[in-house]
Amino acid sequence: MTTALESPTASPLTTLSEEEQMFQQSVRDFAVEKIRPLVPKMDHDAVMDPSLIKSFFELGIMGVEVPDKWGGAGSSFFTAVLVVEELSHVDASCGVLVDVQNTLVNNAILRWGNEDQKSKYFPMLTSDTVGAYALSEAGSGSDAFGLACKAEDKGDHWVLNGQKLWITNAYEAGVFIVFANVNPDAGYKGITGFLIERDFPGFTVGKKEDKLGIRASSTCELILEDCRVPKENVLGEVGKGYKIAIETLNEGRIGIGAQMLGVARGALEHAISYVKERKQFGQKIADFQGVQFQIAQAATELEAARLMVYNAARLKDAGKPFLREAAMAKLFSSQVAEKVTSLSVQLFGGNGYTKEYPVEKFWRDSKVGQIYEGTSNMQLATIAKTILTDKL
Ligand SMILES: Cc1cc2nc3c(=O)[nH]c(=O)nc-3n(C[C@H](O)[C@H](O)[C@H](O)COP(=O)(O)OP(=O)(O)OC[C@H]3O[C@@H](n4cnc5c(N)ncnc54)[C@H](O)[C@@H]3O)c2cc1C
């Protein structure tokens, strides 16, 4: 199969291979037909419908990049990005569940897991087990390497103590990548990644947050009290967890860019339909030039965000540097999402301010894009560092 990257002439970023189109269309159809009817209740109850999670496995989107010998789809990072965009254009909570599974959990195991870990965990993660990625703590968010969770070497096993906060998918997850420090005196060089199963002794999923947006996506505390972890469950090398955490998040934030792209697109699609129906002053509001210009501006910014996200994803698949492009894509698409969803509420007038219409939820869902996987200030810090030390 020829992908856009392998074609003899450079293809436009938005030109999709057959496989990419297939994933895009099947997830788009699923999102519109099966997810959309469930969205208001899931948002109200702040619970993901379990039937959807089952369907994500059946659709093959919980292991997009995982090789087929372990049950995955053996596709690309770019395909995972398309999947996240399509889900998020209907529901950002579904988008982030699948995003964390692919761009953080599977990605970290693909890059740093050994053969035994891959052959044990991938068949689970591609068939019925949701994964979660636990770095943040109450005292360490942007300063992620200041984490306080500790791991002690007990000879034939590790014992972990501490708490994690804000962990996406934790309510549903069966496997968790947890970062803890094996030697706090060594600072970040003591940070180590561990693969933890939900039923390991001493491991508990705690309080679930009641959130502004992405309400159906679970965000929970994790409690580790003398949690016993087998020796073989260290992910990568002891003391190299900081590298896993930073590099996985560099990739993961392209996925968040895709989520925000989907959110902006979903809201704008609703707004475009609405302005073509709603009449004031005896004409459709879409006929007012003032409204047309607002929609044209939003569509332009959405297109710019899309090109940035797609480019960052294609750079990653091509094995080229993408740190700055990923940070820029997340920064910009989360800003565009907040702006475009706000405009969509505005174009719905009073209706936009009620839960009878879908746009207020898109607006609420947009805000988190500027917070998780590195706040906007953290993205700006990364971009500034690369600009001031490298060439533009
Ligand atoms: C819904 C949700 C889901 C999440 N899911 C996960 C998950 O699955 N796994 C996980 O590990 N974490 C997760 N997080 C945590 C998330 O990554 C952190 O919230 C984020 O990194 C910010 O950390 P903080 O909340 O401690 O804010 P802080 O770090 O306290 O930041 C507060 C403010 O200060 C600013 N700030 C901080 N330092 C600087 C600086 N040096 N320069 C300029 N400004 C600065 C920030 O930009 C921000 O505006 C999630 C968070 C949310 C809200």
Image (spheres, rainbow, N blue to C red):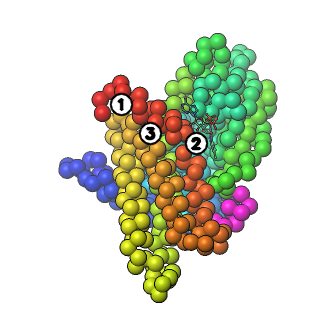
Q: Is residue 322 left or right of residue 39?
A: left
Report the residue marked by disc 1: 387
Find out whether the residues at labels 1 and 2 contact each other: C-beta distance under 8 Å: no
Residue drawn where x is 39% and y is 36% of the image? 324
Q: Residue 392 in magenta?
A: no
Task: Find residue 289 and report its horizontal and vertical position in percent.
Answer: 38, 73
Q: Is residue 98 left or right of residue 170?
A: left
Residue drawn where x is 54% and y is 22% of the image? 240
Q: Quadrant of the C terminus?
A: top left
10 Å crowding of disc 3: few (<14), some (14-19), many (20+) = many
Q: What's the amino acid at mark 3? A: Ala
Span colored in magenta: 36-47
Helix, strand or loop at label 2? It is loop
What is the number of the mark on residue 327?
3
Q: Which residue appears farthest toward the top when viewing the image?
A: 185
Report the residue marked by disc 2: 372
> Foreground residue, 265 or 125?
265
Task: Find residue 221 and report its horizontal and vertical position in percent.
Answer: 73, 39
> Foreground residue, 359 or 160?
359
Helix, strand or loop at label 3? It is helix
Q: Is residue 25 left or right of residue 216?
A: left
> Foreground residue, 156 or 131?
131
Nearer the N terminus, badge 3 or badge 2?
3
Q: In the rendered image, is residue 139 in sight?
A: yes
